[in-house]
Image (cartoon, rainbow, N blue to C red):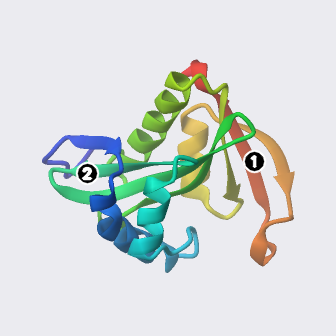
Amino acid sequence: MVGVTHPILILKATEEDAYELAKVSSEAAKEGMVREFKPEEMKGLISNEGYYIAVGKLGEEVVGYILSTYSWGKLHILDIAVKKSKRRMGIGKALVKHLISHASEKGLPEVYCEVKARNIPALNLFAGLGFRFRLFSTLVEGGFYGLYLSIQAHER
């Protein structure tokens, strides 16, 4: 993990994190991989018990997040974003591992996500953590091919 001077800290997001999380989402949205959230939207998601958001920090700096929802008795990853300047440091991997542990603690059998087929870094991240391809679909906004990936929460 080149360039990491502080340990990566992964925590459940709080409303105080909302502004910084919105900034991370704004930067990542410019690449077309995640949705941009305003601070108030992020605050609403954080306070909504139907969602679970974890924040990644290096020291006090918010550097990434993972947004998920409880769906069909499973945990569905909606978005994962890491500041461009902080990528390739293991932050995304730490966020996903945290989410898998959270699902296991909650007794949820599976964590799943949809990834655009052109998002090679995300596909590599999830495959490297043991996620398996379950479904290939063209029913993704913008005409992109999407891949459904999942992992059994107790596998990790």
Q: Which residue is drawn at 51% across and 53% down?
A: 48
For the view shown, which residue lies furthest in the top direction? 154
For the view shown, which residue lies furthest in the bottom direction? 30
**Which amino acid, by three-letter code, is at mark 2?**
Lys
Q: Where is residue 124 in the image (x, y as percent from the top left)?
A: 57, 47
**Which amino acid, by three-letter code, is at mark 1?**
Tyr
Q: Position of residue 87 (x, y in %)?
A: 36, 58
Mark identifier at residue 148:
1
How many residues crowd mark 1 within 10 Å: few (<14), some (14–19), many (20+)? some
Earlier in the chain: of badge 1 and badge 2, it is 2
Query: Which residue position is annotated with label 2?
Result: 57
Q: Which residue is drawn at 68% across and 35% down?
A: 74
| Residue 87 visible at all | no
Q: From the viewer's side, name the closer residue of 6 and 21.
A: 21
How many residues crowd mark 2 within 10 Å: few (<14), some (14–19), many (20+)? some
Q: Where is residue 79 in the image (x, y as percent from the top left)?
A: 55, 58
Q: Where is residue 31 in the image (x, y as percent from the top left)?
A: 52, 76
Q: Relative to 77, is 39 above or below?
A: below
Task: Mark 1 and mark 2 in contact? Answer it, CB < 8 Å.
Answer: no
Mark 1 or 2, which is nearer the eye? 2
